Image (cartoon, rainbow, N blue to C red):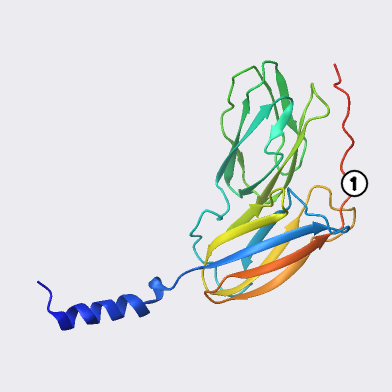
Amino acid sequence: MIPRGIRALLAAVALFAPWAVPAATITATVADDQGRPLADAVVTISPEPGTGTPSPDGEASTPISVTIDQKSEIFVPAVVALRAGGSAMFRDSDNIRHHVYSFSPVRRFEMVQTPGETSAPIVFPQPGVVAIGCNIHDHMSAYIFVTAAPWSKVTGANGQAVLTGLPAGRFVATVWHPRLRPRAEPPVQNLSLATENSSISVTLPVLPPRRPRARDY
């Protein structure tokens, strides 16, 4: 049995030890220039240059693998964030073929998928934006945002992304969207985090959504 005094000492060490300090959470709210919530915006968090790179810890750390499905002739999800060096797989859940391709310099590929088929992992070694399309159905599009940022998340329909597991420190937040207006620079915000929760609000100048197009076959 551990003596009472030793138990009290161990409890005090656990309470004040650095690893016992809770990590911070950032809630990012993104809106368009009309003030409407903006879904499918990629929020990234990186350490401020010169401060070192912490180890990601939490569900909001940038994924190293993702799966993009094809359902009802739509890529699901339409926008994903992926850590540079990570991989993506494509699945065809429709009952028709798809011809998935990318002509983006970051990663070029193309493949024909039959119903029920899942592709082998495709590796994306460097940061950048990869535009995905279907050569059979021109109305289909998706984007892979490849980043070196340790934390990233895509906003939901409410325009929010919650990033968890950030340690105390100084960080830089950026926001990108596939409809960002030409020549518009993705906004950048500097953050100083302790252990409490924080929030940021960003407005993006974006192009209007694409009008629904008739099926092209």
Relative vertical location of residue 124 with respect to residue 197 in this rendering, above or below: above
Tell me the quarter of the image containing the C terminus. top right
Residue in front for this viewpoint, 161 or 86:
161
Q: Nearer the viewer, residue 35 or 15?
A: 35
Q: Is residue 197 left or right of residue 34?
A: left
Residue 215 shows in this picture: yes
User: In this image, 193 relative to 102: left or right?
Assistant: left
Question: x and y percent of residue 54 in the render?
Answer: 51, 66
Q: Secondary structure at mark 1?
A: loop
- Residue 168 left/right relative to 136: left
Q: Which residue is mark 1?
A: 208
Q: With respect to residue 70, does 189 lie above or below?
A: below
Q: Is residue 149 visible?
A: no
Q: How many marks?
A: 1
* Vertical comparison of 60 with 15: above or below: above
When the figure is inspected, residue 177 is found, relative to residue 6, above or below; the finding is above
Identified by mark 1, the residue type is Pro
Q: Quadrant of residue 93?
A: top right
x, y (%) of residue 151? 59, 58
Residue 154 lies, in percent from the top left, at 67, 51
**At 64% from the left edge and 31% from the top edge, which residue is drawn?**
69
User: Which residue is depicted at the point 60% across and 38% down?
Assistant: 88
Instruction: Judge left or right: residue 115 versus residue 23.
Output: right
**Residue extending furthest left?**
1
| The N terminus - image quarter | bottom left
Report the front residue among 33 and 191.
Answer: 33
Image quadrant where residue 160 sits: bottom right
